[in-house]
C-alpha cells in the first residue's frame, strides 16, 4: 500500500467553493483501478490549507491509472481553479512494527 499525500493551499476566500468542488470530484478518484481510500482534511490554524490523503495499491496505480488518465484532467478541472499554488505531492509507505 502507498499513501499519496498532497499539501494543497487554496486562495483565501475560496475555501468553501473548493470544498464543494472536491465533494463533487472525489468520485473520479474512487473509480480508479488500484484505489483504496481517500480523505481530505482542512487546517485548523491555516484554514486555507488542505491535505489530501489517498491510499493506492502502488505508486503506479496512482501515476499510470489516475494521473495519466482523463479522470485526472477532470479532477483537476474541478479543484484546480482554487489553488493558490501547485500542490506538493509525495508518496509514502508504512513502517512495519513488531506489534
Image (tube, rainbow, N blue to C red):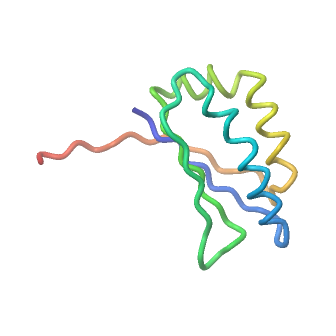
Number of numbered tags placed on the structure image: 0
Residue placed farthest to the left in the image? Answer: 98
Q: Quadrant of the N terminus?
A: top left
Residue placed farthest to the bottom in the image? Answer: 45
> In x, y percent, where is residue 55?
48, 38
Relative height, residue 68 to residue 7 (above, below): above
Which quarter of the figure has residue 51?
bottom right
Q: Choose between 19 and 5: the one closer to the eye.
A: 19
23 sits left or right of 91 in the view: right
At x 77%, y 62%, the residue is 10
At x 78%, y 66%, the residue is 15
Q: Choose between 25 and 64: the one closer to the eye.
A: 25
At x 72%, y 61%, the residue is 9
At x 51%, y 23%, the residue is 34
> In x, y percent, where is residue 88?
65, 50
Which quarter of the figure has residue 90?
top right
> In x, y percent, where is residue 72?
74, 31
25 sits left or right of 35 in the view: right
> In x, y percent, where is residue 17?
83, 60
Amino acid at each position: 500500500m502507498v499513501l499519496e499525500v498532497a499539501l494543497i493551499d487554496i486562495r483565501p476566500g475560496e475555501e468553501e467553493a473548493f470544498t464543494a468542488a472536491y465533494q463533487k470530484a472525489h468520485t473520479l478518484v474512487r473509480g480508479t483501478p488500484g484505489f483504496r481510500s481517500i480523505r481530505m482534511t482542512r487546517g485548523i490554524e491555516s484554514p486555507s490549507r488542505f491535505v489530501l490523503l489517498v491510499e493506492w495499491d502502488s505508486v503506479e496505480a496512482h501515476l499510470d491509472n489516475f494521473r495519466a488518465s482523463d479522470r485526472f484532467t477532470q479532477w483537476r478541472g474541478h479543484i484546480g481553479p482554487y489553488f493558490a499554488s501547485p500542490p506538493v505531492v509525495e508518496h509514502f509507505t508504512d513502517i512495519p512494527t513488531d506489534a
